[in-house]
Image (spheres, helix red, strand yellow):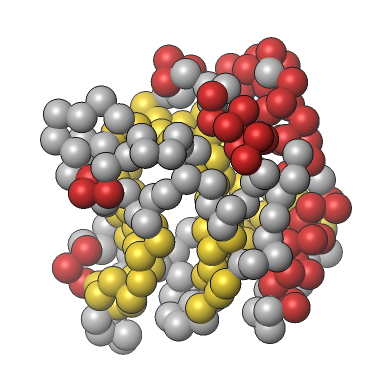
């Protein structure tokens, strides 16, 4: 399996965020998309600020699924390795993007799906221990209607002095500085800081059964 970040392009305003596309070789990407876990394995997250389904390392079905899927087992082990984490951190350094140091790095992996009909993640900056987030799209070519939305919106507070709370501040408090549309075989990469506001949706696919499928890797500081 080949991951390709050589062509990753970053912006730094309002915070460091970029896109690698294509992220995978075609054969590997197709195999991962076709073997993405079924929605029945992904519990619903319907609390404040969310409308999505997710399966992560804290859940036993996550481990059961990986044990049944050699390609996902291999991919998860590769992407969670110290070698890959170092690769991403060095990529950012090469791009002139600073990341706060840590005595030890760790990571978390998640499968996620959000309904085209109303799925959303409200504006937030991510928790303090996160350092870098990678969001991989998992969809077939031609599967998604761009009119549904579903891109990752890079947000800038309209009032930079306002005290805004993640998942509670309304979209009306922000301008959309940039959008990374939800398209096949890409990875959105961004660095957590105090202004790393981003959101998804609400999506506009009323009545559609489609799901916005992604995998996310969070690189985190286990200790500062």
- Splitting the image into 4 quarters, where does residue 69 fall? top right
Residue 7 percent across, percent down from the top left: 64, 67
Image quarter (top left, top right, bottom left or bottom right) of the C terminus: bottom right
Residue lying at 81% horizontally and 45% vertically, measured from the top left: 81
Residue 176 against residue 113 in the figure, above or below: below
Closer-to-camera residue (111/61): 111
Position of residue 85 measured from the top left corner of the image (x, y, whole percent): 77, 56
Q: At 79% across and 61% down in the image, what residue appears? A: 87
* Residue 131 appears in the rendering: no
Nearest to the observer: residue 68 or residue 145: 145
Q: Which residue sits at x=79%, y=52%?
A: 84
| Displayed quadrant of residue 155 | bottom left
Q: What percent of the width, then of the height, locates residue 207? A: 14, 29
* Residue 180 visible in rendering: yes
Vertical comparison of 197 with 30: above or below: below
Position of 171 with respect to 95 (left or right) is left
User: Which residue is at the front of the view, 18 or 154?
Assistant: 18
Q: Is residue 195 above or below residue 222?
A: below
């Amino acid at each position: 399996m080949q991951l390709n970040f050589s062509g990753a392009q970053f912006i730094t305003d309002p915070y460091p965020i970029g896109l690698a596309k294509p992220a995978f070789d075609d054969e590997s990407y197709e195999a991962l998309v076709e073997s993405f876990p079924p929605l029945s394995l992904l519990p619903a997250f319907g609390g404040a600020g969310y409308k999505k389904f997710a399966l992560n390392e804290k859940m036993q079905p996550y481990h059961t699924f990986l044990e049944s899927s050699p390609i996902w087992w291999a991919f998860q082990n590769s992407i969670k390795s110290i070698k890959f984490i170092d690769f991403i951190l060095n990529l950012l350094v090469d791009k002139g993007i600073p990341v706060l140091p840590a005595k030890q790095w760790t990571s978390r992996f998640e499968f996620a799906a959000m309904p085209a009909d109303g799925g959303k993640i409200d504006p937030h900056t991510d928790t303090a221990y996160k350092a870098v987030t990678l969001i991989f799209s998992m969809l077939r070519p031609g599967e998604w209607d761009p009119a549904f939305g579903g891109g990752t919106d890079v947000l800038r507070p309209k009032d930079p002095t306002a005290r805004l709370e993640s998942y509670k501040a309304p979209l009306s408090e922000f301008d959309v500085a940039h959008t990374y549309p939800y398209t096949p075989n890409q990875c959105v990469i961004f660095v957590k800081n105090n202004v790393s506001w981003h959101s998804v949706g609400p999506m506009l696919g009323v009545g559609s059964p489609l799901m916005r499928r992604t995998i996310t890797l969070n690189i985190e500081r286990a200790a500062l």
